[in-house]
Image (cartoon, helix red, strand yellow):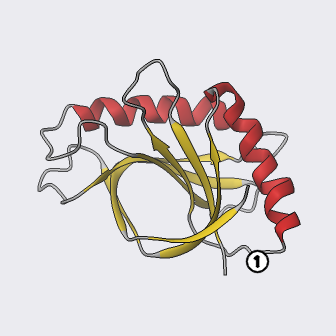
Amino acid sequence: MLSVELFPKRTLLGLSKPFISATQPNSNASEVIGPLWSEMSKLFFGMKLDRDANPVGFGAMWNSVEGEPGSMIYFAGYEIYGIPEDLGGLEVLALEPTKYAFIEHNGPMSELPGKITSFYKDLLPASGIERLDGIDLEIYHESENPELPPRVVIAAPVL
């Protein structure tokens, strides 16, 4: 079910890289996003940060300036509560309070790409809610039980 809510201001620490959206036939999302998360996580967890035991992971995406359809920037990072003096090779992304339409994915991670495609191609257009240009989000809430997959929120900025 599609929900709409104002998401609060957040500060993220992570890495970014260009990619082609999973909604496009020439997508390279699976080749870019997984390795980016791996590289970022090594740097992030190697730092001595004041953070929760299970930090909330964010995939943030926005349109690239390139003209190719689906060309975007993907930012993989974790929410932090204070910006460290030494970023350790990571980047800061500040998210302002924004209204989002979103759904939750509570299944296997292998089903996430299909859920994302369905959200953007079917659910969001059928809702009649006006989508805005901005930063789209995937929010990964890790379960305290490592046997369970994370709960993932898929969100698009809306009017």
Is residue 131 among what the camera can see? yes
Q: Nearer the viewer, residue 134 or 150?
A: 150
Position of the N terminus by quadrant = bottom right
Q: Residue at x 78, y 46 (%)?
A: 117
> In screen coordinates, is 151 left or right of 12?
right
User: Which corner quadrant of the image does residue 124 belong to?
Assistant: bottom right
Is residue 28 among what the camera can see? no
Residue 150, above or below 65: above
Which residue was labeled with disc 1? 130
Q: Residue at x 50, y 34 (%)?
A: 150
Where's residue 14, x and y in %?
A: 36, 47
Residue lying at the far top in this picture: please name it.
147
Position of the C terminus by quadrant = bottom right
Where's residue 88, x and y in %?
A: 20, 43
Q: Residue at x 62, y 28 (%)?
A: 109
> In screen coordinates, is 82 left or right of 78?
left
Where's residue 112, x and y in %?
A: 67, 36
Residue 29, above or below 87: above
Q: Secondary structure at mark 1?
A: loop
Where's residue 15, x and y in %?
A: 40, 46
Residue lying at the far bottom in this picture: please name it.
159
Q: Residue at x 51, y 75 (%)?
A: 98
User: Which corner quadrant of the image does residue 48 belong to?
Assistant: top left
